[in-house]
Image: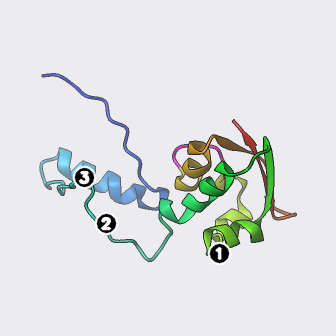
Amino acid sequence: MSHVEAKVMVPEERLAEFYTLMGRWLAGEATLPSVRRGARRSRRASGPSASSYAAIGKHLADVASREATLSFNEIEAIIGRALPASAHRHRAWWANTDTHSQALTWLSAGWKVDAADLDAKEVTFVRD
């Protein structure tokens, strides 16, 4: 039997649900739902999807300089919605990690967060 390594991206708020489902599947108690490529998914009302933050990456891709400082208000105008409370309270929300959907948008555009000043409510991005 051959093995394949797969990287699975799971939103942090759904991690417990993922582990429960995988545990049930491994125990033979559940079947995993089939997901077709390109199938339309419903959006959960409880949190924004990665596409909610796509505008950040698009905006940064158009910046000519190697550094860009944006206020939280500017970011909210770019994405067309309020940032979640965790973005205002926790530096970790701005971490350059591929486990956060929002970070994937700036990382994919070739940028990373250099500094997040929660008191001043601004973030400095630099080209990676």
Res 116 seen here: no
User: Percent x, y for residue 73?
Assistant: 76, 71
User: Percent x, y for residue 26?
Assistant: 19, 44
User: Is residue 55 positioned above or below 62 on the image?
Assistant: below
Q: Read off the residue under disc 1.
A: 82
Relative to 11, is 107 on the left or the right? right
Q: Nearer the viewer, mark 3 or mark 1?
A: 3
**Magenta highlight range:** 95-99
User: Percent x, y for residue 19?
Assistant: 33, 51
Q: Estimate the spatial distance between the alpha carbons at disc 1 and disc 2, rounded to whole Å.
A: 23 Å
> Between disc 3 and disc 1, whose residue precedes?
3
Q: Read off the residue under disc 2.
A: 41
Local SS, label 2:
loop
Q: Is the C-beta separation of discs 1 and 2 under 8 Å?
A: no
Q: Read off the residue under disc 3.
A: 37
Specify the amino acid type for callout 3: Arg
Most foreground residue, 66 or 7: 66
